[in-house]
Image: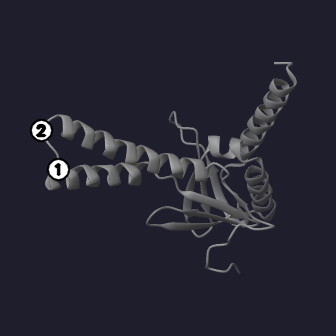
């Protein structure tokens, strides 16, 4: 059975390499909004404590909306840490792997305990080690028989990731 505490990424774990830049960008954008609002107030109606507090609250909400979830994957476990929630998915016991029929580039993972997580395809493309571990765990789920919905989706994702990798190699070598 799995340990209920979130698994840290380490020698056998993988973390989203884009999390730090995206988190920093969220804070920078919120701060820039706050500073711009204060500058507009200074030129216009004047800076007051109430208006400053209001702009500060709006800037904080902007940071909260833009702040990305922190994703780490160890063999058999995907941990998605939001600002207020943590979701732990047993990736070696997946029951479904789906891509919604909308325009989003998301993959929805559901484990046998009915816990769900959504991953953006861009996240998988930017983190090849995370994708390889997720694919290995999903194939283990298929082998064990727990993955009842999503084998075609898994094969399609693997094909797409291979195509993306080939494109990046061609681009890097100038064959593009």
CB contact under 8 Å: marks 2 and 1? yes
* Residue 5, placed above or below residue 37: below
Q: How many marks?
A: 2
Mark 1: give few (<14), some (14-19) or many (20+) Cα within 10 Å.
some
Check disc 2 and report the residue beneath it: 45
Residue 5 position in % (x across, y down): 61, 78
Report the Cα–Cα distance between label 2 and label 1.
10 Å
Residue 22 position in % (x across, y down): 55, 47
The residue lying at 14 percent from left, 42 percent from top is 46
Query: In the structure shown, which secondary structural element does the residue marked by tag 1 occupy?
Result: helix
Check disc 1 and report the residue beneath it: 51
Q: Nearer the viewer, residue 110 or 10?
A: 10
Q: Nearer the viewer, residue 115 or 86?
A: 86
Horizontal side, residue 64 vs residue 81: left or right: left
Query: In the structure shown, which secondary structural element does the residue marked by tag 2 occupy?
Result: loop
Please tell me which of labels 2 and 1 falls first in the chain: 2
* Residue 107, placed above or below residue 4: above
The residue lying at 20 percent from left, 40 percent from top is 42
Q: Nearer the viewer, mark 2 or mark 1?
A: 2
């Amino acid at each position: 059975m799995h340990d209920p505490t979130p698994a840290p990424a380490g020698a056998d774990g993988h973390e989203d390499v884009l999390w730090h830049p995206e988190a920093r960008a969220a804070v920078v954008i919120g701060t820039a909004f706050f500073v711009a609002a204060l500058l507009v107030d200074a030129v216009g109606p004047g800076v007051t404590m109430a208006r400053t507090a209001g702009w500060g609250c709006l800037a904080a909400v902007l940071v909260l909306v833009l702040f990305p979830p922190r994703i780490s994957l160890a063999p058999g476990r995907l941990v998605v840490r939001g600002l207020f929630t943590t979701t732990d998915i047993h990736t070696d016991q997946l029951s479904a792997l789906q891509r919604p029929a909308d325009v989003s580039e998301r993959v929805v993972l559901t484990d046998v305990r009915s816990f769900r997580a959504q991953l953006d395809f861009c996240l998988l493309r930017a983190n090849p080690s995370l994708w390889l571990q997720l694919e290995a765990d999903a194939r283990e789920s298929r082998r064990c028989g727990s993955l009842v919905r999503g084998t075609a989706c898994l094969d399609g994702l693997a094909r797409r990731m291979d195509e993306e990798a080939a494109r990046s190699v061609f681009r890097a070598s100038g064959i593009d």
